[in-house]
Structures are given as C-alpha cells and as structure tokens.
Amino acid sequence: MRDPVSNFLTPYRHGPLFLLLLAASTLLSAGCVTYRFGSAAIFRTGIRTIHVPIVRNDTFRHDLGIRLTEAITNEIENRTPYKVTGDPNADSTLTCRVTRQTKQVLSEADTDDPRALNAVISVRSSWVSREGELLMQNSVVPSDDISISFAQESRFVPEAGQSVGLATQAAIEQLASSIVSQMELRW
C-alpha cells in the first residue's frame, strides 16, 4: 500500500507543474546558501562572543562607568547576534572610557537661574578581535587611532521637574545605542 503523499503526487509526478516546482526549489536552495537573513547580515560572521569590561570613568560621577557598561551590554544582547561574556578570552573585546561629563546651561531666567540645560557625556571606545584586529572603525573620518570618540547630550529643564539624573541616563542609553550601531558592517 502506498502512503498518502505518494498517492497525492502520482498524477503530478510527470506534469509540468511538478517539474517547475522541483526546479524552483533546487534553484532557491542553491542560490541562498551564502545569503544571510535579518540583522545577522549587518554584523561580522567570525565574531560570536564579546567581552565588555567595566567602562573606565575619568569623571567625578562615580556611577557612570557601571551604568554605561550595563546599557552597552543590554544593547549588544538585544540588537546583535553576539553574546556578551565575562571571559577575557572571548572572540573580541569592547573597551570604553568615559572622558567627560558636564552640564551646559542653554537658557537662564531673569534671576540667572538655569532654565534649560544639557547633560553631556563623552566616551572613547575601541573594539578589537582576539587577534588584535581593529573591528570598529570611524566611517566618517578614517584615522589610525584605535579608539573612536562618542559624545551625547540630553536636554532637561529643572523647572519642569526634570533631573540631571534622568537626563544623564537618557544620554547613557543613547551612547550605548551609538556605540553598538558603530559595530555594524559598512556597506
């Protein structure tokens, strides 16, 4: 007794539709072997793990390094195919350093009290493979420097109940997004 599938295909086995489907499936399977789908197409194939040491902090705000490390780790895990690991022998290492944190007054009241301010954070970052190859490169201005500078500002208005802490956290999250975006392959 034949199985139901071969009974179904018997009338079509030698028909043009069956041959067309067979040819199409053969071409599609052969043509897509090297094609990568989704977000994996914009990231390096030889890298699977990234070591992200705690971000060094050159400012007086003691918690910036830890907060930026957490934001970068979350961003890598959520947006890339890479796995963040605590192992220093990972496929690659992403190191960052907070070089500057400040507030800039944008506007003042008649009493010289600040009305609108920017929280500004500057970071230097480098991404290097286990073999020492520089993986993150500045796409705008090529240079021989092994690290790239990032700066982010976030506006806040104290009179409206906004705090420097919330503005700093917004700047940290935007910095993490910018750093991880720079990890993408260039076209």
Image (spheres, grey):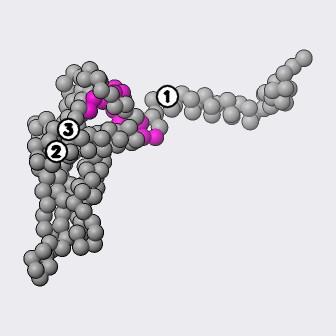
Q: Amino acid at mark 2?
A: His
- Quadrant containing the C terminus in the rendered view: top left
Q: Amino acid at mark 3?
A: Val
Left-right relation of 67 to 35? left
* Viewer-proximal residue among 177 and 27: 177
Q: Visible in this render: residue 178?
A: no
Q: Is residue 2 magenta?
A: no
SS at badge 2: loop
Measuring from the top left, give residue 176's x and y in whole percent: 28, 46
Identity of the residue drawn at 37% across and 31% down: 83
First in sequence, mark 2 or 3: give its number: 3
Residue under pointer 2: 62
> Callout 1 environment at 10 Å: few (<14), some (14 to 19), or many (20+)?
few
Q: Is residue 39 magenta?
A: yes
Q: How far apart are labels 1 and 2 at the CA level?
A: 49 Å
Measuring from the top left, give residue 16's x and y in whole percent: 75, 34
Q: How far apart are labels 2 and 3 at the CA level?
A: 11 Å
Residue under pointer 1: 33
Q: How far apart are labels 1 and 3 at the CA level?
A: 39 Å
> Callout 2 environment at 10 Å: few (<14), some (14 to 19), or many (20+)?
few
Residue under pointer 3: 55
Magenta residues, as a range? 38-52
First in sequence, mark 1 or 3: give its number: 1
Q: Amino acid at mark 1?
A: Val
Left-right relation of 142 to 168? left
Q: Visible in this render: residue 56?
A: yes
> Callout 3 environment at 10 Å: few (<14), some (14 to 19), or many (20+)?
many
Identity of the residue drawn at 30% across and 30% down: 50
Measuring from the top left, give residue 49's x and y in whole percent: 33, 27
SS at badge 3: loop
Comparing marks 2 and 3, which lies closer to the viewer? 2
SS at badge 1: loop
